[in-house]
Image: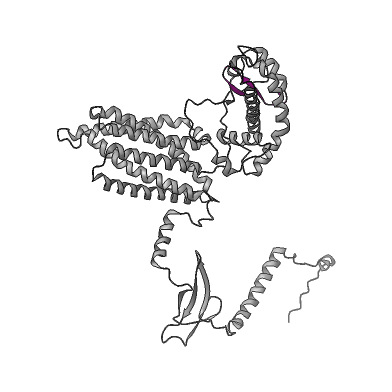
Amino acid sequence: MAPAVGIKRTAAAQAVTVQAPPPPPDARLVREAVRTSTIAEAVAPAALEAPAPALEGFLCLEEVEGRRWKYVVDAAPGKGKGKGRGRGGSAVPLGASVRAVPLQSPLPPAEEIMAFVRSYVVPEGFPDSVTPSYVPYMTWRALKHFFGGAMGVFTTRTLLSSVGVSQSKVTPGAIAINWILKDGAGRVGKMLFARQGKKFDNDLKQLRFSSDLLLEIGAGIELATAAFPQFFLPMACVANVVKNVAAVTSTSTRTPIYKAYARGENIGDVTAKGESVGNIADLLGTGLSIFITKRNPSLVTSFALLSCGYLLSSYHEVRSVVLNTLNRARFTVAVDSFIKTAGYVPSLKEGNSQETIFIHPWRHEPVSIGSRFGEAFQEPVSFVATRPLFEDERYMVTYNPTKDKVYALLKDHAKPDDILKAAFHAHVLLHFINVSHERKRMSSNRSDHYGNPHPRNMDFLAHIAESCKIVSSSYGTFRKKAKEQGWIMSESLLNPGKARLCVTRPQ
């Protein structure tokens, strides 16, 4: 027997104890998650064995635009005894189906038709989704398109007759060339007028009504081609240029108007329904006009009546728009009311209703904002005398008697609020000037009002100084009351000129 072989360990080796490193925290969490899931899997079968409550016939209620339905479970014939399991563990009859039961009686056919029509002509959520002035605006807009569609039949018929469609001696090629040239001239006019840009925002209502006036002028020129068929091409080109300019204005001002009526993010819905109303009214007017033309009515009489209806509808359409921004017309209404009533600022509805809609091109504007130096001051001494009154302001205000106009000159770095204040100051000064003129109107010769046959800026320095005191104490009140009435004061649409006075001297 072989002797046992002993292995002798050293003391150091006996003293060393090998220990496994502690597992990282992540490993403990993984083991705990695995242990928990194992327990859950063991318990789950037992839980599923518990009896689940059987569903009754009723499932839930549903409401759509004020009408309610209830959903119930119907068991299939011959399969009602068996039970299945729903997602929530409830017992559901095998082969069951869900049935919707209306809780209201069916709508009468007339109401069903009206509901169908409303889905095309009013935005979703009407009337809460739009402002209160939406209904009168769309009513007048529909009337305008009705008269416009009716006039379109007369003008198209006249143009076709004038170009020679009814005359066999005119070749189709010549007719097509004339028609293409007419349309091409209109597109050129549309492109040239599009450069107006910002004016479509500043004087939205005024330009909208002016575009309808231009549209009527263009239609009148088209009808005149019946009397002068030999001048068809030049007259048709002019008419189409005018009508395309009107179309650019109408398209450019459409979105801001619809935006004023939208409550929330439904501008697309309001625009779509507004255009749908216009198209429906246009089709109705076209149909009526086709019926009328079969009886060969007087062309001049028909056009006069339709034009009056169109322009009247257009005027009331624009008048019904309520905007909360301040352009020159609405700002004039607000400031004049504040001055004449000792502090009252009109509401949005009042200010918009008093706004001047039709402004003819030759109208005298008594206030100019952002003017050039040469327009405002007649002599250097007037500027030197006026400048100290506006050292702390970013604008200057003066009155030029030779042009009978108040000028507001803006300094560089003028902010939107400085422009508003300058315009407010200009209207206050204009009020003082008008009161002074009224007091001295008893004189037969207006040149003697100030004892000088040639009045200068210097003659009105006292009025300018007096206006500075009033503005310093009242502009803050005006601004606060205007904001309380809902007017937007952070930005304005006063459209000032581009000239600015530079404070620093040139090197």
Q: Magenta includes 472?
A: no
Displayed quadrant of residue 404:
top right
Residue at the outermost left position? 169
Q: Which residues are drawn in magenta?
A: 390-410
Picture coordinates of residue 271 (x, y %)?
Answer: 46, 48
In the image, residue 87 sits, relative to residue 501, either above or below, namely below
Q: Tell me if I can see residue 24 in this picture.
A: no
| Viewer-closest of 192 and 408 | 408
Residue 354 x/y as whole percent: 55, 38
Above or below, 160 against 15 in this view is above
As drawn, 40 above or below 324: below
Identity of the residue drawn at 48% across and 48% down: 136
Instruction: Identify the residue at image location x=45%, y=40%.
Output: 315
Residue appearing at x 49%, y 46% in the figure: 258
Which quadrant is the N terminus positioned in? bottom right
Say whether residue 316 is left or right of residue 184. Answer: right
Q: Is residue 225 left or right of residue 201?
A: left
**Does the image show residue 89?**
yes
- Asked which quadrant contains residue 331, the reply is top right
Residue 433 in the image: state x and y as whole percent.
64, 24
Instruction: Indicate the position of residue 465 as horizontal and vertical percent values.
Output: 71, 23
Q: Which of 92 and 395 is in front in this view?
A: 395
* Residue 400 on the magenta segment: yes
Q: To which quarter of the image does residue 165 belong?
A: top left
- Look at the image and tell me in which quarter the C terminus lies: top right
- In the picture, measured across the screen, residue 79 lies left or right of residue 162, that is right
Residue placed most toward the observer, 10 or 45: 45
* Count of marks overlaid on the render: 0
